[in-house]
Image (cartoon, rainbow, N blue to C red):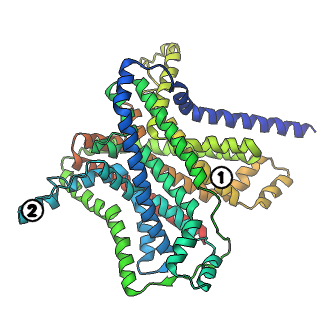
Amino acid sequence: MLKLKNRIKMLDFWNLASYFTLLLIIAPIFYILLNIFNSSSEQTSSLLDSSLNEYLINSSIIVFFTALFTTIIGVFLAYFESFYEFRFKKFFKFALVLPFAVPNYLFAYIYADFFSYSGWLVAWLRSEFGIKVHFDMMNIYGVIFIFTISFFPYVYIILRGFLAKFSVNLIESAKSLGKSDTYIFFKVILPLSRAAIVAGASLCVMESLNAFGTPNYYGVHVFSTGIYKAWVGYSDINAAIKLAGILLLIVFFFLFVERIFRKPTMMTTSKTRRQKLQKLSKKSEIIVIGAFFAVFFISFLFPMINLLVWINRSFESTNWAHVFDISQNTLLLTIFSTIFIIVISLFLTLVSRFQKGKAKLLSNSLANIGYSVPGSVIAIGMLMIFIWCDKHLASVYGFLGIEKSLFLTLSPVILIFAYVIRFLSLGYNGIEAGLKACNKSCYEASLSLGYGRLATFFKVDFAMIKTSIYSAFILIFIEIIKELPLSSLLSPPNFRTLAFEIDRYASDEQLAMTAVPSLIIIVFCFVLLSLFYKIQKKDKI
């Protein structure tokens, strides 16, 4: 009886600890929501009146067309890869994930430079043939193009995973009725894949709303650039909070719409029998390979070639000592933040495993909310909370001899906490999925032998979810090292990251100088994506 009471007390303690952790994580988001309706100054009202409509219109156009084009490309690639056999298929299966290794803002710099007046193609056509070509990329259409080639893998990967488990019986039944492949695609596969497609498209929408570097460089005014402009340009934190709050409400609206469209229409099977792949005719195969290569060339190969050209131009003028310093800063920050996220994710999933009903649903919802919220919104919330903490810790700083009044706000700690809020869901969902896949009999056997739940988790479950932990670590690391909105708003003056330096060089129109820090990010992401691909492949065997 005493043991049972102690266990109940321990569970209550862990529950309270998990809720406290989650409250800390969502505090910046609540701060924004609580302060959105504060009275506005004349400057704030003027700023919102002059810009809000433009932000709404531009953001809506970008989100709609990005979702549309990424869906078209992602569905095309996933469908042909899942149901047809053609040459170079294995190569494309990995190659078409590589755009994830490239930050979207780098795509923006490369294509803007390529199509500019001084770009090598435009200059060559002008000098050799007297052809004057003017192709302006730096507008809303350019932003949509950049987001499309950067975010289409979300739809492609999610749908590819779904189609790998698609019910073979449905396709065979349709074929037995004499239905064509076109009919099966539009009337069977597409409707039943709606939830997977919407899931991928919604991630594209969230990434589009989060992106800062591309619209900022192209001069397209959206919410993320507006928040930065209000805070950094006008020093109007009230306007920044209101814009962040409006953007947050828009995100919640999109999440609500996504829930409606993601109804349980998916038909998958756990059977090992695979769909028999169809062979394409020679003409069709050439067209499909050409289309796959075109996507790969535009979204990865060409940007890499252009990046190497920039490295050749900037190699001698690169300050290698500075590059080493910012690389070291970035790696330390990224590794520490990723480990911190993994530890918190392990703790939350451990507690969540003991929870049931509404308590479990609440924990899952709070843990996942951060990834849906744009980085600029989290940054503003973090700034205000850390400034408040610094004000109330002023006497402690004085006692310790710390001269900085904004000690925490101007330290890397604020970035670490911001990364935790933004990317916790990647660690939490990855580890939770691994736990769900574990055989419960091992867990129950350990309990029957007298081991506690905590001991069982570390001695049994931990060993079984190592693959999930490694995968989560890789995904979080890649996201953090590329992250710009948080870095641009929260990086301390004496602590620069690679993403921040790339943005600074681009703002100064020193595009060639972005090459080395960009390549460092891409190399790390490429290596980690390769490891992730191998882990996933090994896990399936």
Q: Residue furthest right?
A: 1
Sooner in the amino-acid sequence: mark 2 or mark 1 = 2
Callout 2: helix, strand or loop?
loop
Amino acid bearing label 2:
Ile
Q: Which residue is mark 1?
A: 432
Whether residue 11 is situated above or below residue 81 in the rendered picture:
above
Amino acid bearing label 1:
Glu
Which residue occupies 81% across, 56% down? 444
Whether residue 477 is situated above or below residue 379 in the rendered picture:
below
Left or right side of 252 for 437:
right
Give coordinates of residue 246: x percent, y percent. 47, 34
Query: Which numbered dot is residue 131?
Result: 2
User: Of circles 2 and 1, which is in front?
Assistant: 2
Give coordinates of residue 236: x percent, y percent. 38, 23
Callout 1: helix, strand or loop?
helix
**Residue 527 in view here:** yes
Left or right side of 218 for 490:
right
Which residue occupies 56% across, 44% down? 424
Whether residue 331 is situated above or below residue 201 in the rendered picture:
above
